[in-house]
Amino acid sequence: MFRRLVTASKGFMPKRLIRNVPSSSIRGGLLFRNVGGALPCAYDRCFTTATTTDQKQKGLVVGMLRETYNKWERRAPLTPHHVQSLLQRLTPSLLSGIIVQPSSHRIFTDSEYEEAGAVLQEDLSNADLILGVKRPTTNDFMYPQKSYMFFSHVIKGQAENMPLLQYILDKRIQLFDYECIVEGGMSLSPTSTERKKKRMVAFGEYAGIAGMVDSFQALGRRLLSSGYSTPFLNCPPAYMHYDMNEMKSSLLQMGSHIAQNGLPPDLEPLVFCFTGKGGNVCTGALEMFQLLPHEMITVKDLEEFRCGSMKGPHKRVFGLVVEQEELVRYKDQAKQQHQPIQKEHYRKNPSEYESAFYDRIAPHINVLVNGMYWDERFPRLLTKDEMRNLYHADNKRLYVVADISCDVNGAVEFLERTTTIEHPYFHYDPISKEVAEDIRDDGVTVCGVDILPTEIARESSTHFGNALLPVLEDLICSTHVEEGSNQTLSTTAVPFQESIAYLPVELRNACIALQGSLTPEFKYIEALMHRPHHQPATTSEPHLLIWLDGHLFDSGLINQVLDVIENNECHFVFQECTAGGKPGSLTSSSALLRVSGRKVEDLMEVERKIKQLVNLISKAEATMACYKQGLEDSSSSFVTVESSEKEQSVLLLGAGRVSKSFAELLGRTESRNIVVAGADEDEARSVAAEASKGRHIVLDVHNDWDLLAKLIKDSDVVVSLLPASMHAIVAEECIGMKTNLVTASYESEDMRNLGERAASAGISILNEVGLDPGLDHMTAMKIIDDIHERGGTVASFSSVCGGLPAPEAANNPLLYKFSWSPLGVLSACQNDATYRIQDQIRSISGKNLLNSASSFNDAWPTLHLEVLPNRNSLLYGPKYGIENASTLFRGTLRYNGFSKIMHVFAQMGLFNDSSSEGTTWSDLMNYLAQGNNSSNLDGFLLSCANGNQKLANQAKDCLQWLGMAGSSTVTYPESIRKSFCDVLEKNLTLQDQERDMVLMHTGVEASFDDGTVEKHQSSFQIYGDDNMTAMCKTVGYTAALATDLMLDGTISKPKGLLLPTAKDIYVPILGALEKEGVSFDESVLVLSPPREQAL
């Protein structure tokens, strides 16, 4: 194929980029490359040999990733046409080739790329620059010392993407982010309040185009539910069209039907309202809307328009594009009359304004297409209460809301969640404020798809590639050495500030990571990477919005601000963060922080201290504004925060040993009503007293079916701390009432059988969120996810846990005291167990479990511990993603000797649930001995100890210590096990001034492709205190924090049965537990260092 020679000159590089690049600087580059088979070097300017005109320079190789972020993601950064154009325009000395990963998912076929000149290949390791659209979901194709360009979503310090960024830094990958390629570079003056500069590489108006087409279909379905059949119903969703031409043809045909036949005669004129005038979303939406027969009207026309006698059938639709000044008004009545609204004043002082949309526009429109920018500093477009007021006034005109901006609970407050391409709508009932999946007659159909451009994958890819092409050519050409140059390139790395100058400013400031470090413009992310992540406060919780401008990161101001927030027991989330400037100078930055806390006083203290910091740190040259939406007195100088939290009801079933800590933690805020239901009124009352707003009720779960159903129906979340055998009963009711459920118990077979029904009911059942199970999963997944994200493989996994008396309280023959249910302990001692050691699978029946204990010496050797296998460890291979680990073991810790004595008791029949013969323990022992063909207790014990006289003597001493060898009464003749548990509970209970102890230890060995072998260990040793036991704290607090995530919507997908193995569950829980004094000691030992790289 003939390729025209193109040199990196002003004649080739786009004028908009070349203006900041000195002509003498076109020689250097930043891309990691392989030149003539040499090792990768830091920059193109760092070749291992000199380059002259007599040598041929190998051009770059560009790779293109297969998209894996979402099944609907069919876009590509370059189309086949773009590939062909690049290969034709650039000589081999600039561009050696393009490698494309095969994909049957992409909108363009593999054969189209081959015909364009690309090489189809799974392996991209030979590429120098690798392109994608969305960030990769795995690190499989993230090669060390390569350059990548994709939407990374890391610049706000988004916690979910920090592992990816850390991997990029660890592997010395160079990262360019499309989001940061903006006109003039990512810079913002310290006093600017303007939005981010215009992106040069984006998907343009295609979100608006797809959103408008989908909203036509939504309108058709909504009108059908009200009894109207319209042509809108025949409009297919955007993704069902082959291309834009087919889509436009479909809309023109629909418009033709409207123009010829009109809409139903008794249907009022349909008014479509568009916000975000001048923006990409609004522009794209209008382009589609205007293919229909239409008439544009103004806000002034609205009231007169509705009052007119416009009888149907209407043969056109009406469009209204709203100016920003028409959406708001001054709160001050005097200003409303005499002072016109100015955009700049509104943007700087949003707290002086309120929304005018509700009473000025909303009552008159039928479809709202929202495409405007919004954050919490600004008034909402339409709130839930305003929507309900419209319905109470019998104004039900608003059929459809297409929120293309897709801000959940944002400008349109009742956008409760994002929707998907396959399920693009939900029904919102303004009166009940409830959401349903099916479209109904009475309510609003809401669309909120967050990946709309991929519905038009062909054209949006073309648009994106057209914008990317000149940027890409700039990047490639920046590595070119001009012909005729005899200069020798440096063989040593040069400072970033010098090398970065060889790129245009737009690209220079879009480079986030280089050579294992964040670039100067993005150094601020370091302040966010290793701090605990907190879920944002809901809009109903008390919180501040703090806007900061200045040299926030260079001066250290931002670190001190975050310290102030955390030291006052508040949480923060970055809503926006922008930084930029010239290398070598102080970086101008802006940040919008959302700060939430339990107490209003804490928030006010945070505001006061941050104001002091802004005034004291003069180097920052910072300004600050503080906002609280909806408060008349809020301003940039002072803010009053009032608690307007939405009340939520939690039904806590069970008032046992661990329930108090649950009620105490979750009930710290008065917005949470904790209803404690238990069989014992005194116990239930005591637990309820731990919550700020707690109440108790007597409930027999087995018999009070009607009461249980009512309590579940009235609750936002149900938490079952009942015995595990009772969870399925509760789950059945929760499915019927469509109420989420949380338990701290293992996921039983009965519960697994309910999984599909729970998913169909649209609820989540989160199991195993206690200590063990619970925290063991979380600390394990934290280690395993880290290993997998760095490309490693888990070779060996073990996790052990035990609830024990503190050493000084282990003062009985069993060396054990109960900090949780004795019945639960006995049940756990009879479970079958399966595990794998060095690829050998071992299985133990429940009746032999106590006889299988072995010494545990991996941690705390002075405690003299033993470990019992815990259930089926192999089940957690696929759940943890470590199916191929040669060792997979989960165990329960006890003091050495406990298991052997308890095994003797089990052999005696004390674990059986059968009725006893006789009323005293002496009678019962004789009865059990006779059943064993033993004539006396001593012979019976020796037989049960398998002939071990020492063990038999220890067991007898223990029985005598427990009072079970004499004439004491059997408390529950109907059940030997229940009577035995009663004895254990009375004699093996922690006394005043005694404390319990919880131990947990996780060990993981991992191997990596470079030969590295690591041993990870994570453990804690926690003691109870005067307020609560360690068991109570670790189980109850964990369950409470999981419930909190359920209540605030963090845990909303997927539906059905869940375990705490996902990051969005375990990361916030572990972070919150650390603040409550429950933290892990973590270490990594390198057993085998990496193999030396070949020179």
Image (spheres, rainbow, N blue to C red):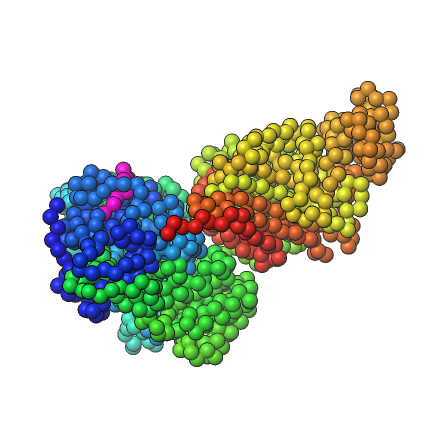
Residue sitting farthest toward the right = 967
Q: Name the residue located 64 percent from the left edge and 28 percent from the top edge.
A: 845
* Image location (x, y in percent) of residue 785: 47, 47
- Residue 823's spot in the image, x, y percent? 70, 37
Q: Which image quarter: residue 392? A: bottom left
Q: Is residue 163 above or below residue 586?
A: above
* Residue ID at (53%, 65%): 566
- On screen, residue 164 versus residue 11, left or right, reads right
Q: Nearer the viewer, residue 929 or 882?
A: 882
Quick check: can you spot residue 192? no
Quarter of the figure with the N terminus: top left
- Residue 488 rendering spot, x and y as whole percentages: 24, 64
Q: Vertical placement of 624 versus 153: above or below?
A: below
Judged from this view, the residue extending furthest toward the top is: 933
Q: Residue at x 55, y 44 (%)?
A: 1004
Q: From where the camera sits, is residue 124 visible? A: yes
Which residues, given as a range, are shown in magenta? 98-108
Q: Main secondary structure of the magenta part?
A: loop
Left or right of 968 on screen, residue 266: left
Q: Nearer the viewer, residue 714 or 769?
A: 769
In this picture, residue 812 sits left or right of residue 60: right
Residue in front for this viewpoint, 61 or 404 = 61
Decide whether residue 231 is among the magenta residues. Answer: no
Closer to the camera, 739 or 926?
926
Relative to 197, is 173 on the left or the right?
right
Q: Is residue 463 above or below residue 441?
A: below
Q: Residue at x 45, y 72 (%)?
A: 557
Percent x, y for residue 950?
Answer: 82, 33
